[in-house]
Each structure stands twice: as structure tokens, then as C-alpha cells.
């Protein structure tokens, strides 16, 4: 399953860091961050708890870029 989330990030490099962090999160099959549209598309692994996974994605993104935001 894929879901799209609105994000707030200051630069393209930060968006790349967020994308990498999201991809490394357990339960995420793939993630793409588009800096131009300020959106993150997350593809979840089968059977993943989407809410719990997205909380972890948010935490992971905050670790690499503290002033970013992922709107759940």
C-alpha cells in the first residue's frame, strides 16, 4: 500500500536525508520525497501497521533533520 504525506523541509539536501531515513525504517518497502511538491510517498510492507510505521518514520526524519515535519 502507498500513501502520500505532506512534508515541510527547507532544502533539497534535507529532503534527500529524510528519504534515506524513511527507507531504512522497519515496515517501509520504499519511500520517495519530492522537495518541489513537499510530499513524501511511502510504500509499506505487507501487513505493516501504517500508523506505527509512520510514527517511526517521523522520528527517523527528525533525527537527521530536526526542523523538518511530516504531517500524518
Image (cartoon, rainbow, N blue to C red):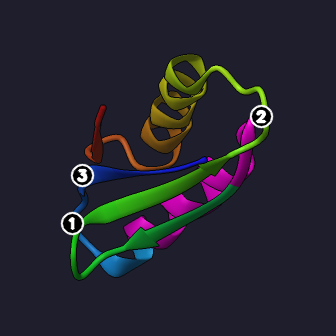
Q: Earlier in the sequence, mark 2 or mark 1?
A: 1
- Point out which mark residue 40 bears: none
The residue pinned by badge 3 equals 6
Tag 3: Cα neighbours inside 10 Å, few (<14), some, or many (≥20)?
A: some
Q: Residue at x 46, y 60 (%)?
A: 41
Q: Describe the element under mark 3 as helix, strand or loop.
A: strand
Give the prevailing secondary structure in the magenta stretch.
Answer: helix
Q: CA distance from mark 2 to mark 1?
A: 25 Å
Q: Which residue is mark 1?
A: 10
Kind of element beneath mark 2: loop
Disc 3 versus disc 1: distance between alpha carbons?
13 Å
Disc nearest the viewer among 2 and 1: 2
Q: Residue at x 23, y 82 (%)?
A: 36
Residue density around tag 1, few if under 14, some if 14–19, many if 20 or more, within 10 Å: few
Residue 30 lies in quadrant: bottom right
Q: Which residues are magenta?
A: 14-29
Does residue 56 show up magenta in the picture?
A: no
- x, y percentage for residue 52? 57, 17
Q: Nearer the viewer, residue 56 or 1?
A: 1
Q: For mark 2, what is the residue?
A: 26
Amino acid at each position: 500500500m502507498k500513501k502520500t504525506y505532506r512534508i515541510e523541509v527547507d532544502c533539497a539536501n534535507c529532503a534527500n536525508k529524510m528519504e534515506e531515513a524513511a527507507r531504512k525504517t522497519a515496515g517501509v518497502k520504499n519511500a520517495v520525497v519530492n522537495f518541489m511538491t513537499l510530499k513524501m510517498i511511502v510504500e509499506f510492507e505487507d501487513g505493516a501497521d501504517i500508523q506505527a510505521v509512520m510514527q517511526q518514520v517521523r522520528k527517523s526524519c527528525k533525527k537527521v533533520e530536526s526542523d523538518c515535519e511530516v504531517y500524518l
